[in-house]
Image (spheres, coloured by chain):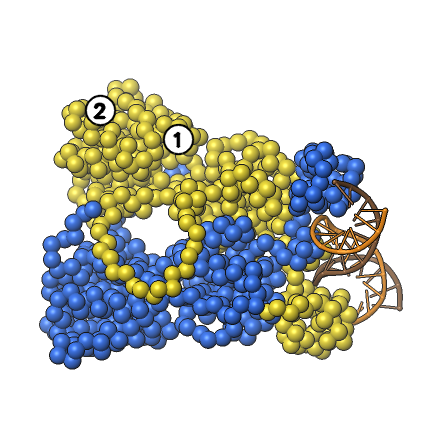
Chain colours: A blue, B yellow, C orange, D brown
Amino acid sequence: MGAKATTVYDVAEHAGVSIATVSRVLRRPGDVRDSTRERVLASVKALGYVPSASARGLAARRTGVVGLFFPDFDAMRETTAFVPDRSGAVPVVADPPAEDATGSDLLYFDEVLRGAEIEAWRNGLVLLVGVGRGEDSLSIVSDIAGRVDGLAVLAGSVPDEMLEHIARRIPVVLIAGPRRDDEFDHVSVDNRAGMRALADHVFDTREIDGVLYVRGVASTPDDAERFDGFSEALSARAVADRPGLSVVSAEFSRERARVIGSSLASSGHIPDAVICANDQMALGILDAFRDHGVDVPRRVLVAGFDGIDAGRHSEPRLTTVEQPMEDLGRAAVHVLTQRLANPSQPPVTLRLPVKVLVRESTTPGPPTPRG
Amino acid sequence: MGAKATTVYDVAEHAGVSIATVSRVLRRPGDVRDSTRERVLASVKALGYVPSASARGLAARRTGVVGLFFPDFDAMRETTAFVPDRSGAVPVVADPPAEDATGSDLLYFDEVLRGAEIEAWRNGLVLLVGVGRGEDSLSIVSDIAGRVDGLAVLAGSVPDEMLEHIARRIPVVLIAGPRRDDEFDHVSVDNRAGMRALADHVFDTREIDGVLYVRGVASTPDDAERFDGFSEALSARAVADRPGLSVVSAEFSRERARVIGSSLASSGHIPDAVICANDQMALGILDAFRDHGVDVPRRVLVAGFDGIDAGRHSEPRLTTVEQPMEDLGRAAVHVLTQRLANPSQPPVTLRLPVKVLVRESTTPGPPTPRG
DNA sequence: CTGAAAGCGCTAACAC
DNA sequence: GTGTTAGCGCTTTCAG
């Protein structure tokens, strides 16, 4: 482990050839006579030679690595230092049903990461994952940019100025975030169309006289796009059967939405449908309605957006719009490879289609048959 | 994007200094006069300079990257080529309750990966993720080894011969797998102690006259260690109240276990407890008992091992041993950083403690109060 | 504090 | 087929 690493020179000497031949054996084995190749390979094995990717990358001017950068989410920052537990004791603990499974950002990121990994794998590339760190994020992302042939970045995690800086060296693709018409390649999810389809589904399920739309307080681009989709669905309907609308804004949290749902229920002023800008809030509404004995879906339909896991296990299960996070990751690397192959192509923008998952919270009839 | 990347030379010229000074400004800013530093930084910005990590790695002989290698699981191989869908259509589909959530290997890996990522992040390192590809795995792992300062490898995914080869260049840590007493650092989970604690819990819950242990067919090291733990719990009990034991082997699948559970139920020969070597099988047993109206936990206790998500939502919820996958990833990188800092320390072996999660499938009393 | 110069290990022409 | 020889872009003594 300690000794100096073997290099081409060592192998060349051991095999009695030149360093160029060693290099050839590794890169283009066909260009070398069988007997020489075998001799070199034997030396490689004997010496435990592992080529330095740094040297190769420097000489070849490409690394075969694509990068993925994301900001340090709270969930990551809150982690504590790792301390190995050598006690060997096995705690036996009661694990009560979790009432409020909170889907953290990290979970989403896992999926994006997996998608990127899959697509990198399919293209014979390796993935370098970098995570921001508060103040240092700028130098970190630059550091990563220095080691890869292309970089995928979560939209909003790096200032445009830095992106442009990096883009002078390697192609950059943005993941998620609002549509943008600039030089960058961009993959994102079609929030507007998704919410449009969700709202259409709700309005088509049965007659809706009044609908409540719950959006987030901080009007993020995602939130805005979703609201646009909702409005679109509304105005697409004939005035005669267009539901009366009320809109409320809340933190994107289950707890806050629960409060809203509660006051709604006790006011007696319950709409026929509640559509939320995300699943967390929809689950909060569900919580409140259950507390107050308001029947979902018979009395009121409820729907969310995101497709988090908790919505799959709620009572009733939550109708939602599933975001293809894994595909986002795949698309990002896909676009990167395309651009690497063809640097001069015009900027690519991919809007990935979402999918409406209809579950019991908007299915007043008999339960969906199992299948 | 296309033009040749700017280098230290460009920056040096632009700032009117030598390349050495540019390098210093970036690596040891304190060694440079304020005015010079600012001038250089300005040039960096103006030119969009991003240092090449390849060149740096070559010159500095360290990369600041740690690698994580895992084999290509089926789930990854089954993946199809990514084809961007530009239709924009939003499918609206019924999403019936999933009866058989299958936790794929990929899911585990996600967690290990996340842990590694977290720990790398905490240590100011970047993570390079490589995935094997059938035949090519050997060259891939070697390729990755060439670009990192240390490498974590899923046990069993790389032949020992190759590991030794790589270890001549950089430190290697094995993740999971059976105990091994060799030169490699190793982090794994204490399967034996976990199953021991689980069995003890079951035996202590109430009087057990007969117990069925369901193990896997292919006797993997994990499977063997778990069985050892189980046997240990058994023989630790006084002969008088030692349960009668039967053992059956099955594929590690929910479906197979369901068949076993069915025949058990219809035979009328139902033990007081069924302990399975993994959760999938325990869920299959639960399925069968539900089908046949066998009351869990009142008539028979059921427990599994792994802590997969599906066990959190089953009916009844499944008592299990939770494996700290994320901690495995963290531990691996932790050990790597330790060794990097102190190359001559003796081989480190970390057995991470597991945790028994007691849920309704082994809790005959009133349901656990909510917390 | 700053500059000059010697590599780091490999690839890619270009000769032979 | 195989060897020679320039670099690739950066870090790091060693002078000054």
Answer with left or right where residue A187 lies relative to residue A306.
right
Query: Measuring 29% from the left and 45% from the top, which residue is drawn there?
Result: B101
Q: Is residue B163 above or below residue A56?
A: above
Real-space Cα separation, disc 2 to disc 1, in angstroms: 24 Å
- Residue A286, quarter of picture: bottom left
Residue reaching furthest to the top:
B239
Q: In the image, residue B196 lies at what x, y percent?
A: 36, 31
Answer with left or right where residue B312 lies relative to residue A45.
left
Q: In the image, residue B224 lies at what x, y percent?
A: 41, 28
Query: Measuring 26% from the left and 64% from the top, which residue is drawn there?
Result: A304
- Which is more N-terminal, label 1 or label 2? 2
Give the labeled residue for mark 2: B209
Q: Nearer the viewer, mark 2 or mark 1?
A: 1
The answer to whether residue A87 of the structure is visible from this angle is no
Q: Hey, what amino acid is under mark 1?
A: Asp
Q: In the image, residue B334 lies at what x, y percent?
A: 53, 48
Numbered tag placed on residue B223 in the rendering: 1
Answer with left or right where residue A307 lies relative to residue B42.
left
